[in-house]
Image (cartoon, helix red, strand yellow):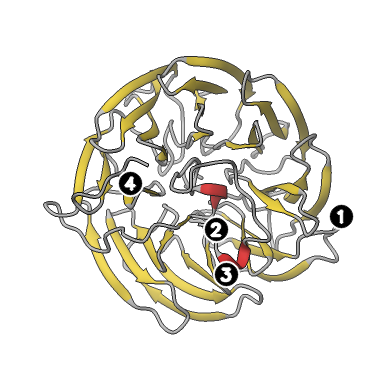
Amino acid sequence: MQPRPTAFWILPALCGLLTCAAAHADDWPRFRGPNGTGVSADKDVPIQWTATEGVLWKTPIPGRGNSSPITWGDRVFIQSSAADGSERWLLCLNAVTGEVLWKQSAAGAAAHAHPKNTLASSTPATDGDRVYAVFWDGKELLLNAYDFKGVQVWSRNLGGFVSEHGAGISPIVYDGKVFLADDQGEKVDKPAPSMVLAFHAKDGTDAWKAERKSFRASYSTPFILKSDKGEPELIVASTAGVTSYNPDDGAEIWNYIWSFPSHPLRTVASPIMAGGLVIANAGEGGAGRSLIALRPGGKGDVTKTHLAWEDQKSFSYVPTLLASGDYLYAVNDKGFASCHVAKTGAEVWTHRLGSDMSASPVLIDGKVYAAGEDGEVYVFEATPTAFKLLAKNSLGEGVMSTPAVAGNRLYIHGKDNLFCIGKAGKSAAR
């Protein structure tokens, strides 16, 4: 699972539609970077590397986790869990040297999770003042805030999390608020309540909450969309559908009810904006897949009016999509890379890479970096002309987590280590 399950710069064509949390231009402050696009503005990240050239450092990460790294300035943050499940951790590393600067602990216990999930699959988020991390102790979710010295500032108990796959939702920060899409529910008589939660980032007090219909536990991470009128919208996707909320007060702006050919599917991949459309995909471990592309805008129920196109077979379950210009680039769970026209969904090309994929790809300077579960990292051109593989790199250990990109460095969380890949002599401090 994506981890978060897990759990997605700004392209010129999207500048009028998207907005992101206040961040340094080079920072990667949440899952899949600024506003969750997975796109970096960096221009000098290595395409190819080996164990002796290009890996600036690798630092063992204790325990086990599928958390993706995030960055701010000269700091990298990542979560993990003790191998026996007894503790959950938030770690802070020096981005230049890989030194672990501090490690904060939260209580935990062993619990059941999907084989591709872990007890620490959430990705933290930061606004440059505090780091916000969701911990699952095996029964309940905690949202903790820490300053950059590792001092806990506040903590909120979010209640239980019900899923046959375990937990893994990730927060985002925007305009002084921390947002969480807590979508739950499984094959139980009384599904747990689902809701979107908003807290004031400074002190953790309630800002608002909005109830959602419970179907299946979902793990996708929201993003912020700017409407045609320039007003921000919080976009949330789950089995229930895709909903736009006012981030100030939680008022619902519009809602699309998702329908599926046979049975409800869960969202692990996160929604993105591409070709002027809000795109969300869902799936399950079997063959079930569903993607919807929606025209943004409107008021109330837009189910019958705003579907631009849909696809029931071509796209991924866990990895999130990428947008570049007029095209969508994707890697699916079985390792097929593809290019589609964003406005119509028409397939341009598809190519088998060779590795199963759980990590979402990232886009750097017109190139897609896709990390396989076997530790092979593929780099190919983001072009509609034809598939062109530029490099294949081996990390020597499996990868389930989406990479981060900052300061012309690529940070990849492997099974045992956090890798920093860059060119020697290039500074990561920004």
Q: Which mark sits nearer the N-terminus, 1 or 3?
A: 1
Within 10 Å of the Cα at label 4, are there few (<14), some (14-19), or many (20+) other Cα atoms? Answer: many
Secondary structure of the residue carrying numbered label 1: strand
- Percent position (x, y) of residue 44? 31, 60
Residue 400 visible in rendering:
yes
Q: How far apart are marks 1 and 3 (CA)?
A: 26 Å
Q: Which x, y percent locates residue 298?
A: 85, 58
How far separated are the C-alphas under marks 4 and 1? 41 Å
Real-space Cα separation, disc 2 to disc 1, in angstroms:
29 Å
Residue at the disc numbered 2: 10
Q: What element carries label 2?
A: loop
Where, by quadrant of the figure, is residue 80 drawn? top left
Q: Which amino acid does label 4 sit on?
A: Tyr
What is the crowding at mark 3: few (fewer than 14 residues within 10 Å), some, or many (at least 20)? Answer: few
Kindly identify the residue that appears in the image at 41 percent across and 19 percent down. Answer: 150
Q: Nearer the viewer, residue 318 or 261?
A: 318
Check residue 411 in the rendering and tell me which mark sits there, or answer none.
4
- How dense is the environment of label 2, judged by Cα within 10 Å: few (below 14), some, or many (20 and up)? many
Name the residue that disc number 1 marks: 301
Type of the residue with mark 3: Lys
Task: Give left or right: position of 20 versus 33.
Answer: right
Under tag 3, what secondary structure? Answer: loop
Amino acid carrying label 2: it is Ile
Mark 1 surroundings within 10 Å by alpha-carbon count, few (fewer than 14), some (14 through 19), many (20 or more): some
- Does the image show residue 137? no
Please determine whether, in this image, residue 155 is positioned above or below residue 219: above
The residues tagged by marks 4 and 2 sit, at their Cα atoms, a distance apart of 20 Å
Q: Which of marks 4 and 1 is in front?
A: 4
* Camera-side mark, 3 or 2: 2
Q: Do the residues labelled 4 and 1 touch (CB within 8 Å)?
A: no
Residue under label 3, please give it: 313
